[in-house]
């Protein structure tokens, strides 16, 4: 739950502590400082600032969320849980910018990873279906709507309503 700058600052503090502990011949504490440094480095690659970005994303502060997401240089190295939410947030940011091609790509990737809840997973699938429908790619929209309704008992009533509306629009547009 650190930004990259905060993570580097904390690593520097532990590195200074490591040097001090080695100077004092307190090798147990020096090894603990190294363990903390390694945990922070591991967290950089596996966790990133996803939690902070999510806080901004849920507060509709997409500029700060985007800035934090841009700090992740290798998203493929994120853990599976974090990667799914990373892609989900990027999809939402691209959707707000009306960059529908990138939004569709990010939501497709998000749907491949585990998300916070079944409802979030369904939301990613519904976004891809909706974007496919907007591009008149009816087969893709239909396939993603079918995937979205797979776990119907776990879906919220609001999401069921959105799916029903998309299915109705899909049927109407396929006929025309």
Image (cartoon, rainbow, N blue to C red):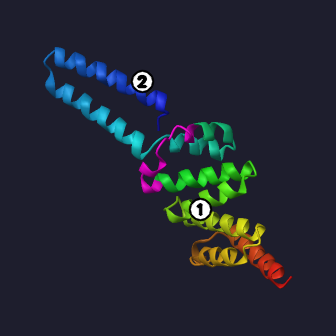
Question: Relative to residue 162, is residue 118 drawn left or right?
Answer: left
Question: Tag 2 or tag 1, which sits nearer the N-term?
Answer: 2
Closer to the camera in the image, 23 or 29: 23
Residue at figure coordinates x 75%, y 71% from the top left = 133
Residue at figure coordinates x 63%, y 36% from the top left = 64
Q: Is residue 111 above or below residue 51?
A: below
The residue wearing badge 2 is 9
Query: Which of the 4 image quadrants contains residue 119?
Result: bottom right
| Residue 120 disc label | 1
Closer to the camera in the image, 63 or 29: 63
Query: Which of the 4 image quadrants contains residue 126?
Result: bottom right
Give coordinates of residue 43: x percent, y percent: 39, 41
Q: Is residue 87 above or below residue 9?
A: below
Question: Relative to residue 17, is residue 136 drawn left or right?
Answer: right
| Residue 105 disc label | none
Residue at figure coordinates x 68%, y 64% from the top left = 127
In the image, which residues are magenta? Answer: 68-81
Does dot 2 land on a helix, a strand or a loop? helix
Give coordinates of residue 132: x percent, y percent: 71, 69
Question: Relative to residue 63, is residue 15 drawn left or right?
Answer: left
Query: Which of the 4 image quadrants contains residue 91?
Result: bottom right
Q: Are marks 1 and 2 in contact (CB under 8 Å)?
A: no
């Amino acid at each position: 739950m650190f930004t990259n700058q905060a993570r580097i600052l904390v690593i520097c503090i532990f590195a200074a502590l490591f040097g001090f502990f080695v100077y004092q011949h307190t090798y147990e504490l020096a090894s603990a400082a190294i363990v903390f440094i390694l945990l922070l480095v591991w967290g950089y690659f596996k966790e990133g600032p996803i939690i902070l970005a999510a806080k901004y994303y849920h507060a509709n502060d997409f500029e700060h969320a985007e800035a934090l997401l841009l700090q992740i240089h290798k998203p493929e190295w994120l853990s599976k849980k974090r990667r799914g939410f990373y892609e989900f947030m990027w999809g939402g940011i691209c959707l707000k910018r009306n960059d529908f091609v990138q939004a569709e790509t990010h939501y497709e990737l998000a749907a491949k990873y585990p998300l916070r809840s079944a409802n979030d997973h369904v939301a990613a699938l519904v976004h891809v279906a909706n974007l496919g429908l907007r591009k008149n790619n009816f087969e893709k929209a239909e396939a993603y709507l079918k995937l979205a309704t797979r776990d119907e008992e776990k879906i919220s009533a609001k999401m069921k309503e959105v799916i029903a509306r998309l299915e109705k629009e899909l049927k109407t547009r396929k006929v025309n």
